[in-house]
Amino acid sequence: MPKALRIYNTLSRTLEDFTPLHANLVGMYVCGPTVYSYLHLGNCRTFSSFDMIFRYLKYAGYKVRYVRNITDAGHLEGDLDEGDDKFAKRAKIEQLEPMEIVQKYTQYFHDVMRDFNCLPPSIEPTATGHIIEQIEMTKELLSHGWAYEVEGTIYFDVEKYSKENNYGILSNRNLNDLLDGTRTLSGQEDKRGRLDFALWIKAKPEHLMQWQSPWGMGFPGWHIECSAMSKKYLGAQFDIHGGGMDLISTHHTNEIAQNCACNGVAPVRYWMHTNMLTVNGVRMSKSAGNGFLPDELFSGSHPLLEKGYSPMSVRFFMMQSHYRSTLDFSNEALQAAEKGYARLMTAIRLIDTLKTEGDSNDMVVALRSKCEAAMSEDFNTPIAIAHLFEGVTFINNVNDGRERISPQDKINLKQLYQDFVFDVFGLKEEAVIHNNKMDGVMQILLDQRAEAKARKDFETSDRLRDKLLNLGITIQDGKDGATYSL
RNA sequence: GGUCCUGUGGCCGAGUGGUUAGGCAGAGCUCUGCAAAAGCUCGUACAGCGGUUCGACCCCGCUCGGGACCUCCA
């Protein structure tokens, strides 16, 4: 029996008890990246958040099928009939085939996911791999009158849909407000209604990515892929659908409309949305030009950064805020996270060396319950982390002889940190740059220095320390001899 | 203009009708030849004004500020 869980549902805008469609099984779909350029940190935050959610669902005892798509076709600039798709545009700029663009940025995406220690999803379907399914769905919608064709392009009829359905159910807006807010854009004359959107788009002859369809050569609209693929792998109705908040009003709204019209049933029971990453209080986005590339963050090459931050420091930084809150990026915040993360990891490493004595108490058990309670309340990672830091103080106190721990509690404590820090939060030890030769050379120097100190020749010992420091090597004197760090 | 979210101590960031969030920074202490590192301990807070209440940072209203979406974006 999986652990009870409450999830904030965008549909109801409240916390709801989570009940999966099929006991013990969870179907989760998350909108993946459009691989026409490098993804930035904002994207990483969303994928890391859902990675954590995926991991906790498994911890809680569910069997999860996690589907995250790759959008590699059909994404128009500005959603206009006339627009180029993003891949075609990028292909021209980089002088590559569109599929080379797709390959390049998919690869980059996967590399970054690995850097952030995100587990691969159960299924990672691509839009180009599901053209047939998208055509089938479009046919289905056409045949029931939910869509219409204008010269080889198929549009979804939002106003017709709205007569029987609540189109703005997810964004909590009514049709008139939506119509008022819609600007008249050039190139949309073919559409009957201003909110109508394309399911299938007629391709111009020079267009590089196009497929045969009943309506001639063309390519799919953006929204239809998620509808088609989620249906194929998770069914017409499934448990969780996730994505960034920015997808609510257009992409997910249209997805719901397509699914409801086609399948006669609301596709998703729990809609989950992650909040935006901000820089100086403003949303990080490609168009705003304030996007951080993962590489720039790791290396510190971005102008706004004073130094580089490791992937795990950044992941920890993200886990220290709730997924539905905006998270602001700054040097100070990143440095605080980096140090806090180091403290946490140091304490975890210490667990194995703890001396045990006495009887068990319920402290460790209570700590686990507190972490579970936090996580079961809409995946509240910051609270769980706060509890884990209480444990850090405890570990250090045991280490300093101020507290004691029983053998069994020590095993439980180790398991607790394994479960939450590594398995649920998805953090890991980062390799330190050490090798045998370096260690050997350093040991010689440390021995020399120890000898000097033994003779009370502090001039020599301090000189060694200072010179090494100039090279970026810090000496730490401890009770059991000195160690160094780079 | 419409639909929402938000305003917590030096910084980041949780949360609750009456009880410690947590991290970083800061202060004190321990360790140390000195230093660094590490560890322990400890402050300062809930935008403003009203209201509800025995009691509000937490509920309600207003004011002011910040942000998101309504156009591609996780």
Image (cartoon, rainbow, N blue to C red):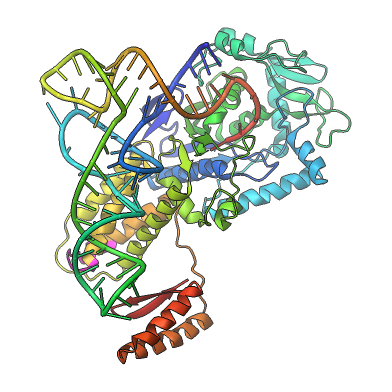
Q: Is residue A8 above or below residue A343?
A: above
Q: Decide which of A252, A267 is in the foreground and name it.
A: A252
**Count of all numbered marks drawn on residues in the image:** 0
Q: Can you name the residue that lies furthest to the front here?
A: A459
Residue A345 percent location from the top left of the image: 38, 61
Which image quadrant is residue A164 in?
A: top right
Q: Is residue A45 visible?
A: yes
Q: Is residue B40 above or below residue B17?
A: below
Q: Can you name the residue that lies furthest to the right here?
A: A205
Q: Decide which of A442, A242 is in the foreground and name it.
A: A442
Residue A245 percent location from the top left of the image: 52, 30
Residue beneath the point at 50% across and 39% down:
A280
A234 lies left or right of A137: left
Which stretch is magenta? A399-411
Q: Quadrant of the N terminus of chain A?
A: top left
A333 lies left or right of A389: right
Q: Decide which of A167, B44 is in the foreground and name it.
A: B44
A474 lies left or right of A191: left
A276 lies left or right of B23: right
Residue beneath the point at 43% across and 48% down:
A333
Residue beneath the point at 36% across and 79% down:
A482
Q: Decide which of B28, A197 is in the foreground and name it.
A: B28
Residue A110 percent location from the top left of the image: 62, 51
Q: Is residue A236 visible?
A: no
Q: Is residue A22 above or below residue A408?
A: above
Residue beneath the point at 81% across and 32% down:
A211
Residue A20 percent location from the top left of the image: 42, 33
A346 in magenta: no
Which image quadrant is residue A60 in?
A: top left
